[in-house]
């Protein structure tokens, strides 16, 4: 027996003891059966539909992708805030006749450089192969995939003077329909605030030499234009420093602030660019450019590339306005988030202070106020995740606007938590609050992650960590919120059967939502959910826990996530999520590289960010504290266990799931901080005062 059964008859009043452990064996399916249920529901969820935004019309999409890209205009440091009719009329003209999107140019250094971006344009992998760390997964030596295009590539430097004759000659005699005529790469030079006009003039000369910025197409597609061939304009990096080696080797911040860059594709006029890499309208990645060019020429790369070709989406919002919104939100969100978060989380800090001051804790009103404040404190997290429902970045004072959005949404949820009929129980408001935290985060992912990009709780699009689904910190909140809500629910469920049914049903729903490619698309979550909820079900059932139970649950989680990943891999490449691409890595022999890269990232975080190492140490101490209240003489927690023995089962599952998540994810420190942070906050919200009656609130 790994843990003592928390449902001992001596800890529960005789009338509520429920069946004996032998009888309870008939109430709970074996761990394999539990896992099978998770697999079935997760599989069904995986087949619900494609990830991300609705796909464009198949016929139109096929027409655009089959039109060969003949010219790629390359610059750096150009954002959508720079493009306007007044400042850059030629670029604006091109934008009005092209599909547009904000583009992530993340590289292997803190700020991407033009030299890195130009190599990415040819190889499809981020950064310079010669200087990239082994954990980045960049093949070395690099392979120029553009060289595979029939006709090759022609490079023209137009960063100072535009060789109009060479550009016209390179494009003569082929129109837009010859797939064997190669690709023209034109370097426009870099964008600087003082040189935008000059950059625009050079772009105008190039476009005039190629046929003009406005494609003459009656059908609305640049493919039918007799003038400008299909052209891409991409800003391949945030900076073009005088000494790129200093940035690439030391990671120093260059003079210009990093941000999302400009991407245009005249093959998709009037549409918002998207891709299978982001599943977000108006947002693409630099690594998507090479697949777009290769696919347009019908060329297969020699390696499995991380990017996906551009897609076009019709949107209600003007595509250029959408790209600008993406850029502004990504640039402003980090500075606007702290006041929005900390101003609301201060309620939790006040609640903790009230509970720590003994004279106040003994007063009923102060104790009730403290518990209420602790219950509503985490409500800011799901509200912040969905804050892009309101365009706060357009306000004159974005930080103040974001704070107002978070406070308004959190206040509505707080009213639900504190005013419902459940307020009469000590466990009611916390249970509802933490259930809302987990449920709303899962709901946002289930809807295709339409709001998290550019939100304080989503991964910043500039860093490019993840554009959809559940990031590790979000999954940690979901796991902690769900277990906390179950712990509160168990105080109302008096039999092991009811607790097991609630645990299994909740675990199946959460597992499916977390792992389904059309929802959370989180590979590591299934490796955590099945063992965690299976462990909790065993503990509350009264069945003595054996080592083969633990191994069986973990094996079931691995089988489940591989099964869903294979189903995702069977979908078209543009519709695949991280799960299907993992199968691609395995089939191409990259499993070892993926595992080592994730382990290396997990450990490297502790080295690069000493604060996270302290967080992990605090998580270790917190885990020990909540599992050993008797040895630490934590009388309030002991009393809670005497009232409701199932609470200890929940804490065991919380700690086990949190540290398992730490082990199997590449940003484990962030996950364990979310799990233990919310878990301890929930525990503080339900702890009795030592003066409370044994079963009172």
Image: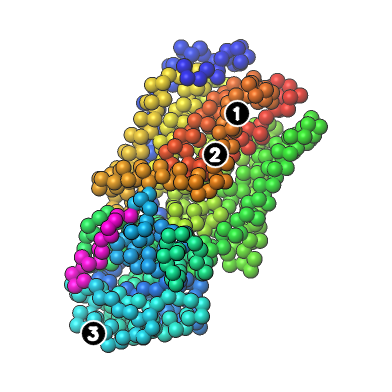
The alpha-carbon separation of the residues under discs 3 and 1 comes to 74 Å
Residue ID at (47%, 59%): 251
Crowding near pointer 2: few (<14 within 10 Å), some, many (20+)? many
User: In which image quadrant can residue 677 be found?
Assistant: top right
Q: Horizontal placement of 513 versus 388: left or right?
A: left
Span colored in magenta:
138-152
Residue 398 visible at all: yes
CB within 8 Å, label 1 to label 2 = no
Query: Which is in the foreground here, disc 3 or disc 2?
Result: 2
Tell me where residue 447 appears, x and y as whole percent. Answer: 46, 50
Q: Position of residue 448 (x, y in %)?
A: 44, 52
User: Main structural element of the magenta stretch: helix, strand or loop?
Assistant: loop
Q: Earlier in the sequence, mark 3 or mark 2?
A: 3
Label 1 CA crowd tier, 10 Å (few <14, some 14–19, many 20+): many
Where residue 499 appears, x then y in whole percent? Answer: 52, 25
Q: Which residue is mark 1?
A: 626
Read off the residue under disc 2.
616
Image marks 3 and 2: residues in contact by CB distance under 8 Å: no
Residue 467 lies, with reference to residue 676, above or below; the image says below
Q: Nearer the viewer, mark 1 or mark 2?
A: 2
Residue 225: image x %, image y %?
28, 79
Per the image, label 1 sits on a secondary structure element best described as helix
Please indicate whether residue 595 sits to the left or right of residue 443 in the image. left
């Amino acid at each position: 027996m790994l843990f003592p059964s928390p449902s001992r008859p001596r800890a529960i009043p005789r009338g509520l003891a429920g069946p004996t452990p032998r009888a309870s064996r008939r109430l709970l399916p074996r761990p394999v059966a539990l896992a099978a249920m998770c697999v079935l529901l997760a599989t069904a969820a995986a087949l619900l539909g494609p990830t991300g935004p609705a796909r464009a019309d198949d016929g139109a999409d096929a027409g655009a992708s089959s039109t060969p890209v003949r010219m790629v205009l390359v610059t750096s440091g150009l954002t959508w805030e720079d493009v306007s009719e007044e400042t850059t009329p030629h670029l604006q003209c091109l934008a009005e006749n092209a599909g547009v999107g904000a583009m992530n140019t993340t590289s292997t250094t803190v700020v991407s450089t033009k030299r890195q971006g130009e190599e990415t344009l040819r190889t499809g992998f981020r950064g310079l192969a010669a200087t990239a760390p082994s954990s980045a997964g960049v093949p070395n030596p690099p392979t120029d995939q553009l060289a595979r295009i029939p006709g090759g590539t022609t490079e023209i430097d137009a960063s100072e003077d535009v060789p109009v004759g060479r550009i016209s000659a390179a494009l003569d005699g082929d129109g837009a329909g010859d797939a064997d005529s190669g690709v023209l790469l034109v370097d426009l030079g870099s964008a600087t605030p003082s040189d935008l006009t000059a950059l625009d003039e050079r772009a105008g000369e190039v476009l005039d030499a190629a046929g003009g910025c406005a494609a003459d197409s009656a059908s609305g597609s640049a493919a039918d234009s007799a003038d400008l061939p299909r052209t891409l304009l991409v800003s391949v990096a945030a900076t073009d420093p005088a000494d790129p080696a200093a940035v690439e080797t030391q990671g120093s911040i260059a003079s210009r602030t990093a941000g999302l860059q400009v991407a245009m594709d005249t093959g998709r006029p009037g549409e918002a660019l998207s891709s299978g890499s982001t599943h977000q309208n108006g947002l693409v990645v630099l690594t998507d450019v090479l697949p777009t060019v290769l696919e347009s020429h019908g060329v297969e790369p020699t390696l499995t590339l991380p990017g996906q070709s551009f897609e076009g989406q019709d949107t209600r919002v003007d595509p250029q306005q959408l790209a600008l919104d993406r850029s502004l939100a990504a640039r402003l969100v980090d500075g606007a988030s702290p006041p929005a978060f900390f101003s609301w989380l201060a309620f939790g800090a006040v609640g903790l202070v009230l509970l720590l001051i003994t004279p106040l804790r003994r007063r009923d009103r102060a104790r009730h106020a403290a518990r209420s404040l602790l219950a509503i404190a985490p409500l800011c997290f799901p509200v912040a995740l969905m804050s892009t429902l309101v365009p706060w970045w357009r306000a004159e004072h974005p930080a103040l606007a974001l704070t107002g959005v978070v406070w308004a949404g959190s206040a509505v949820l707080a009213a639900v938590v504190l005013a419902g009929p459940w307020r009469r129980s000590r466990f009611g408001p916390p249970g509802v609050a933490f259930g809302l935290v987990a449920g709303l985060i899962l709901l946002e992912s289930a809807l295709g992650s339409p709001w998290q990009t550019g939100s304080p709780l989503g991964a910043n699009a500039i860093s490019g960590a993840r554009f959809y689904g559940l990031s590790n910190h979000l999954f940690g909140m979901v796991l902690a919120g769900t277990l906390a809500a179950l712990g509160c629910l168990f105080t109302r469920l008096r039999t092991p059967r009811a607790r097991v049914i609630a645990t299994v049903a909740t675990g199946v729903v959460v597992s499916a939502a977390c792992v389904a490619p059309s929802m959370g698309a989180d590979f590591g979550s299934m490796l955590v959910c099945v063992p965690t909820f299976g462990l909790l079900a065993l503990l509350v059932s009264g069945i003595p826990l054996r080592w083969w139970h633990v191994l069986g649950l973990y094996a079931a989680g691995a089988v489940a996530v591989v099964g869903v990943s294979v189903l995702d891999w069977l979908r078209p490449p543009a519709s695949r999520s991280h799960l299907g691409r993992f199968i691609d890595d395995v089939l191409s022999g990259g499993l070892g590289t993926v595992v080592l890269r994730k382990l290396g990232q997990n450990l490297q975080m502790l080295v690069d960010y000493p604060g996270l190492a302290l967080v992990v140490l605090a998580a270790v101490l917190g885990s020990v504290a909540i599992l050993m209240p008797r040895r630490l003489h934590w009388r309030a927690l002991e009393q809670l266990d005497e009232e409701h023995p199932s609470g200890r089962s929940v804490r065991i599952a919380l700690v086990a799931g949190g540290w398992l998540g730490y082990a199997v994810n590449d940003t484990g420190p962030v996950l364990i901080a979310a799990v233990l942070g919310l878990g301890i906050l929930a525990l503080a919200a339900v702890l009795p005062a030592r003066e409370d009656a044994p079963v009172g609130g």
